[in-house]
Amino acid sequence: MTIDLQLRTRPLMPGFGVEIFETDLKTAGADARQQVVDRFHENGAILLRNQDMTPDDLMSFIDLFGDPEDHTQTQFTLPGYPKIFILSNRIVDGRSIGAHNDGVGWHTDYSYKEEPVMCTMLYAVEVPPEGSDTLLADLCAAYNELPDERKAQLDKLILHHSYQHLMSTRQFGRMELSDEMKAANPDVYHPLVRSHPADGRKALWVSTGTVKGIVGMDDDAALALLDELVEFVTNERFVYRHKWQVGDILMWDNRCTLHTGTVFDDTKYIRLMHRLWVKGDKPF
């Protein structure tokens, strides 16, 4: 017998994302869990609060969305769980247990790969009482607001993404890559305007950090255009600001969003998050 369940939800902001209520992911049945997945694909982001998830629970849930993706910085994965990445400023035995200030700056994850990750999930284990918000920008809403002639201009552009450029210019923890890391992460080229495989909706898929230039454009002109577009898509009318609580699960679709973390007083507070990714496909 099939039971028709209807999740209780509300938008994270008008036209983007949903918060899902009264759903315990550890005990929810297959129908309810599938509806959670469906709401994600329809809305670009989902939020579920008051979850109590073990690493095995996180892996069981992320598997519903596709194949979990590996992480470039393997030194910060959870012991025994190579698909779970630790974000934290906690020091144990003189060593950082996770990446700190990772993800500060508007970007989309793994955009320097031929097949960027489809979605990102963060699970809050320990959060500061202030700061460390996560911001999501709705790139479909931003694209839809452009005049038709501007859309036609941008539809043709191809971005040059580079992991080496990211690691040598980022604000926190600049790093010179080994030859092995360079070989494993060659430069890639992706469209500025990306179509969503589910329904064809278009996103103004600009980013910072990994983007080195625009094919066929002078570097100065390309960077000026990129700055202009990032400023446009991150206007507050397109942005959801998430204030974390312990037990939150926030997931977003990297095919139609940008995101950034924000800093907090790491001399007073500890943050501990688990991050998981799902494999994606080549942007078109």
Image (cartoon, helix red, strand yellow):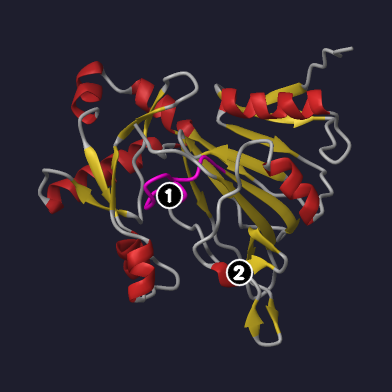
Q: Name the foreground residue: 211 vs 19.
A: 211
Q: Which mark is residue 165?
A: none
Residue 82 shows in this picture:
yes
At 56% across and 51% down in the image, what residue appears?
69
Quarter of the rendering containing residue 217:
top left
The quarter of the rendered structure image containing the C terminus is top left
Identified by mark 2, the residue type is Phe
Residue 130 spot, x, y in % from top left: 67, 58
Q: Which mark is residue 76?
A: 2
Label 2 neighbourhood size at 10 Å, few (<14), some (14-19), many (20+)?
A: some
At 85% across and 36% down in the image, what residue appears?
24
Residue 247 shows in this picture:
no
Q: Which residues are magenta?
A: 108-119
Identified by mark 1, the residue type is Trp
Residue 19 spot, x, y in % from top left: 70, 31
Q: Is residue 267 left or right of residue 248?
A: left
Q: Which residue is mark 1?
A: 106
